Amino acid sequence: MSRWKGLPEELDPRVRQLVVRLRRVKDHSGLSLRRLAAKTGYSTSSWERYLAGRSLPPGEAVEAMARLGGEDPARLLALREVAVEAWAKGKPSTGTEAEPGAGPPRPHGRALRITLIAGSVALVLAVAAAVLLAVRLTDGEGKAAAAPLTASASTAAPGSPKQSERPRYTCRAERIDGRWYAGNSRTRKAILAKGHAGPEVAEAQCLLREAGLAPGAVDGIFGPHTERAVKDLQKRSGLVVDGIIGPHTWKALRE
């Protein structure tokens, strides 16, 4: 088994999960990086970057790795989909590596010029807005001082558009056609991981409670408590314990 170097501390947990799984599949295949490159069509240096968490592998590379290591490609591709979303949020200017045979990247000179021009325009507009705001504040200083209570009441009024309320979810567990549903989502295939939010997460939290586990508040936010409850369910059901909800974990939740 290879002696892997530690992954960067700042690496997103969802990306880390994909890299760790790829490392395990590579070890299981028994292939060296050189042989892996020869069998997949991706260079040795590319695989070094993928397995060090410095760049994300293309879907074809992940699928090829899965088949060589006897792993289910759908499982690895699902992990990659989650990792791509996390990578895009953390590094918006980078993506997956170009496919083999793709042309060289285009020069960035034009993009740089456009960025500089846009920055200059934004700076001019910001200065103009600051001057205009100063004039308005000076002109309306007396009016603001004359009615402080009204302004305060307006700010604190319930239902103000500035006060955003989180969606409220309820658990209404019922068994339909042999499966459990909690009234928030009927999905059985959505990929959910730590950091995700929405009715699908709330549905999973309700079903975790129904299974006697503790996902925390049913707030539709996939946090550490929900992740721990998912791992407990996966351990109990004999699934891969990775804290990610996919089709197999949904099946365990709804049975």
Image: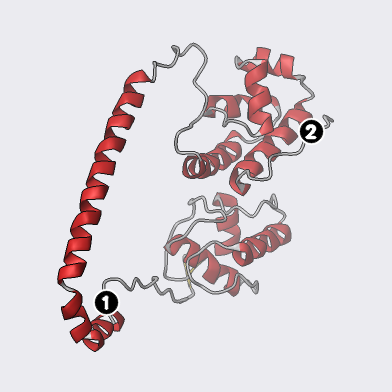
Tell me the residue that label 1 is attached to: 160
Q: Work out whether 244 lies above or below 3.
A: below
Farthest residue to the bottom: give it. Answer: 149
- Crowd around label 1: few <14 · some 14–19 · many ≥20 (10 Å): few
Q: Which mark is residue 65?
A: none
Q: Give the camera-side residue of 23 and 188.
A: 23
- Residue type (three-letter) at the residue carrying disc 1: Ser
Which image quarter: residue 133? bottom left
Tell me the residue that label 2 is attached to: 4
Q: Position of residue 100 (x, y in %)?
A: 52, 14
Can the viewer see residue 255?
no
* Quadrant location, the N terminus: top right
Q: Residue at x 73, y 19 (%)?
A: 33
Q: Residue at x 34, y 71 (%)?
A: 164
Q: Secondary structure at mark 2?
A: loop
Cα gap from disc 2 to disc 1, whole angstroms: 53 Å
